[in-house]
Amino acid sequence: MIMNDAMDQQPPEGIKLTKEQERARRARSIAIAVSLGVLVVLFYIVTLVKGPGVLINRPM
Amino acid sequence: MSLTVARVEPKIEPSIAGVGDYIELMKPRVMSLVVFTALVGLVVAPGHVHPVIGATALICIAVGAGAAGALNMWFDADIDARMARTAARPIPAGRLLPGEALAFGLTLAGFSIVVLGLLVDVFAAALLALTIGFYVLVYTMWLKRSTPQNIVIGGAAGALPPLIGWTAVTGSIAVEPVLLFLIIFFWTPPHFWALSLYRADDYARAGVPMLPVVAGARETRRQILLYTLVLAPLGLGPWILGYAGPTYGIVAAVTGAIMTMLAFRVRAETNSHVASKQMFAFSILYLFLLFAMLLVDRLSAGFFGALVGHLPA
């Protein structure tokens, strides 16, 4: 409550997102997080399959 | 402390683009055909690939295809807005800014190529880069707006995925995947021209020099027939050259005959578009069946081979 009051007293500054914009941003953020998580898991699994070192120590 | 920004920025509303809009940018239906043909290239390639590596290759190819789709929608937003078929796409519909699509496409293209190169095969990654580059730079930016041969040459990008799949396993190129490339390459013009016959007004309005717009419906119908007459024998190629069994041969012969028959009917049509629509719809089934049969052929051979191998002598 105190926090809210303090924020209310400040003049509005910058861009204020509408509910719809906030929802969309949240959905996009979650999707990016999931994609990055999948990428991490993918690299982890492939490292297990190929064995360590193959990613950098490869014949050219 | 207060920060006052005095600069006047152009008024751009914060994005309302949802995850679905971004998925739509990746052209999921085109992507599914790309993944499917790449899978066939991967499975028919000789030698063994670990399922995880194979799946990784397919994911990279899918994301790369999505990147190409997004970059295409970024560049073609003006055309898409003027065509009924594409007016509801995210950018012309105003749900997504062009810059968002550009950033999305470039990011996915970079990630898909680098990950494919790091985790699977550098040569396959180079082919994926070539495919995306060809589709975006050569087809979308250059040929599409300048020549009625746009989809003929641009079709090479759509024909490359089986080669990428093959290369992901073998690290090299052979006759068989080139044959798969040729099948898709010669399939693309009749497929798209059948569509463009009954969408000619749309293309004309958007200023895209599709063959019916530039050379007329009559010439387009003739070209559809010519390409189909090359395509149908090519479809038999994998069986003739011994890459696939008789089941594939029979399916390729029957569906190839139907394609040829439809092409003759398209040629005979003058004012109606009944045969063109049939040709467009059947061409998708045709390509799907050819590649599905290659898949079945190889998988069943592997299955029965393993079965025989386990039988007591």
Image (cartoon, rainbow, N blue to C red):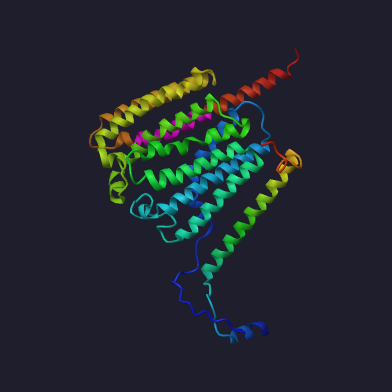
Q: Nearer the viewer, residue B148 or B41?
A: B148
Q: Which residues are magenta?
A: B277-292
Identify the residue at the far top of this view.
Answer: B313
Q: Magenta part mainly helix, strand or loop?
A: helix
**Residue farthest to the bottom, as pictured:** A9
Q: Position of residue B298 (x, y in %)?
A: 59, 25
Q: Residue at x 36, y 52 (%)?
A: B79
Nearest the camera: B52 or B258?
Answer: B52
The answer to whether residue A1 shows anywhere in this view is no
Quarter of the image where the N terminus of chain B is located? bottom right
Compared with A13, B113 (above or below) is: above
Residue B259 placement (x, y as % from top left): 38, 27
Furthest-front residue in this view: A60
Q: Quadrant of residue B243?
A: top right
Residue located 70% across and 38% down the image: A58
Tell me: A41 left or right of B11. right
For the image, the number of numbered tags is: 0
Task: Give coordinates of residue B283: x percent, y percent.
Answer: 41, 33
Q: Quadrant of residue B261?
A: top left
Q: Residue furthest left?
A: B271
Residue A46 in sight: yes
Question: Relative to residue B175, is residue B24 depicted above or below?
Answer: below
Screen quadrant of the C terminus of chain B: top right
Of residues B91 and B67, the one drawn nearer to the viewer in this rendering = B67
Residue B1 is covered by the magenta coloring:
no
Q: Position of residue B36 (x, y in %)?
A: 54, 36
Residue at (36, 29) in percent of width and height: B227
- Give me the residue at 45% from left, 46% from top: B136
